[in-house]
Image: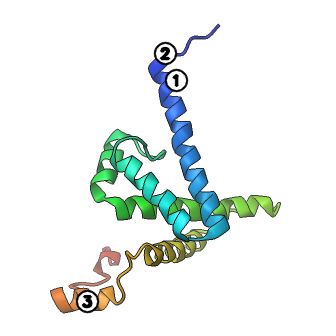
């Protein structure tokens, strides 16, 4: 008979619960989009992460601490981005072709869904690029990071 230390078994159970919460969010997005019940699920998930009751499954402790410091908008956007990537990968498998989505496909879906969520959650700021330019001036060396010599 194999005995698992209590702390380890609790960690496994919590990981399963954390993932179940995300799966509930993913199902709500797929079914209802970003209507109020879905927004409430996302808000509850974010609150549980910020309160230390839930961990985001992909991060170790130090990454998780930084994730929490970034705030609720990033946590919600990360859940949405994860949903987008998973839904594209899953749809490729369901279609029976085992096709792996390209990065640009994932990027476009993530961008679209995060914007939809941000608008529904009233986090979206129209013309943010113009506002930032008016406050801080034009970007300095825009795109220069791509010019490596």
Q: Residue 144 versus residue 107: which sits nearer the camera?
A: 107
Locate the N terminus and report the quarter of the image it occupies: top right
Q: Secondary structure at mark 3?
A: helix
Say which label, 3 or 1, has the lower sequence index.
Answer: 1
CA gap between label 3 and label 1 equals: 50 Å
Q: CA distance from mark 2 to mark 3?
A: 54 Å
Regarding residue 134, the answer to whether it shows in the image is yes
Residue that sits furthest to the right in the current view: 96
Visible residue check, residue 137: no
**Which of 105 and 131 lies nearest the eye of the viewer?**
131
Q: Are marks 3 and 1 in contact (CB under 8 Å)?
A: no
The location of residue 47, given as percent across then percent down, is 38, 52
User: Residue 15, image x and y in percent?
Assistant: 51, 37
The residue under label 2 is 5
Residue 49 place in picture, x, y as percent: 39, 48
Q: Which residue is mark 1?
A: 9
Callout 1: 10 Å neighbours few (<14), some, many (20+)? few
Residue 131: image tag: 3
> Does 24 sit left or right of 49 as displayed?
right
Picture coordinates of residue 58, whole percent (x, y)? 47, 47
Q: Is residue 37 left or right of residue 141?
A: right
Task: Please tell me in which quadrant of the rendered image residue 31 appears.
Answer: bottom right
The residue under the point 38% across, 79% down is 124
Q: Are marks 2 and 3 in contact (CB under 8 Å)?
A: no
Above or below, comparing residue 61 to residue 78 in the picture: above
How crowded pointer 3 is (Cα within 10 Å; few <14, some 14-19, many 20+) is rated as few
């Amino acid at each position: 008979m194999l005995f698992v230390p209590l702390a380890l078994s609790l960690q496994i159970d919590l990981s399963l619960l954390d993932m179940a919460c995300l799966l509930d969010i993913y199902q709500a997005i797929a079914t209802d989009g970003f209507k109020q019940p879905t927004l409430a699920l996302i808000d509850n998930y974010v609150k549980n992460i910020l309160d230390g009751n839930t961990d985001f499954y992909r991060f170790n402790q130090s990454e998780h601490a930084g994730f929490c410091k970034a705030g609720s908008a990033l946590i919600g956007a990360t859940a949405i981005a994860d949903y987008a990537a998973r839904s594209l990968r899953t749809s490729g498998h369901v279609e029976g072709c085992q096709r792996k989505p390209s990065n640009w496909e994932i990027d476009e879906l993530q961008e679209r869904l995060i914007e939809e969520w941000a608008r529904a959650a009233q986090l979206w700021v129209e013309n943010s690029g113009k506002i930032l330019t008016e406050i801080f001036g034009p970007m300095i060396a825009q795109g220069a990071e791509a010019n490596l010599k």
